[in-house]
Amino acid sequence: MDNKLHLDLKGLCTHFAGAESAQNHTRILSQLEQFERFSRFFKENDLEFERLHTACSAATLLFPETHMDLVRIGIAGYGFWPTQETFELIKNQLPPENRNPLKRLLTWKTQIMSLKKVKSGEFVGYGKSFEASQDMTLAIIPVGYSHGYGRNLSNQGKVLISGSFCPVVGTVNMNAVAVDISHLKLAKSGDEVILIGTQGKNEITVGSFAETSDLVNYEMLTRLPFQIPRKIVDLSLCSSR
């Protein structure tokens, strides 16, 4: 403590790992008590920090006592709940008129690259993972596993075209995927395709996408490669038009 005059203490912090799960909450509260003991120790020895901060997204939402001088939200800043369990733990505290106060910011979209007719009995894509049971019309989408659209979505995933769900057929390729649009009569090359987001009255959420691909929210959001173009949209301008 003899050298405390030479110290410039900016912040005292900790991280609540696992705050999104109820099974960890006893440990989180114990960790908070320990942090407060450390904070008191420094203060009693005339060591003042400019800021105290402990709260990740889940702690910010579930433990108001962790807010202190600032919070360090990560996934919540993008409008996503850390886990479904976090939402279930807090939803009864939310007002009826605003049951989901987090507004999701991400839409992942592309366009139909081309259309292809497939006859009954023909196979789609690599191998024989999908055989057409009837004549079909497919849309080829320029997105594949190199873009973060995993191979485990082969014959499992779905996209939105013209506001309608269209299932993935065949194996997801490195940079392309085929979807069944036989029920869409007016679809054409260049039409918008939603991989994650809303189109018309339907939505593909990150949560539902992650469940289909066996990923957690965090992994899904961070695995989208940098070469996918990003466009920042001012939602206030969109709503005023």
Image (cartoon, rainbow, N blue to C red):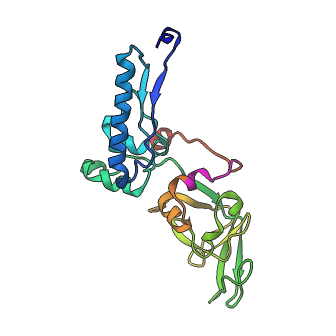
44 vs 92, nearest the viewer: 44
Q: Quadrant of residue 123?
A: bottom right
Residue lying furthest front: 2
Q: Which residues are magenta?
A: 219-226
Location of residue 90 with respect to 123 vertically, above or below: above
Location of residue 98 with respect to 49 vertically, above or below: below
Q: Is residue 201 left or right of residue 120?
A: left
40 vs 213, nearest the viewer: 40
The reply to whether residue 68 is in sight is: no
Tell me where residue 52 appears, x and y as whole percent: 41, 26
Q: Give the residue at x 36% y 18%.
A: 43
Q: Give the residue at x 73% y 77%.
A: 125
Tell me where residue 186 appears, x and y as whole percent: 60, 71
90 vs 191, nearest the viewer: 90
Location of residue 201 with respect to 51 vertically, above or below: below
Tell me where residue 58 appears, x and y as whole percent: 40, 45
Q: Give the residue at x 70% y 80%.
A: 124
Location of residue 228 with respect to 55 vertically, above or below: below
Q: Quadrant of residue 121?
A: bottom right
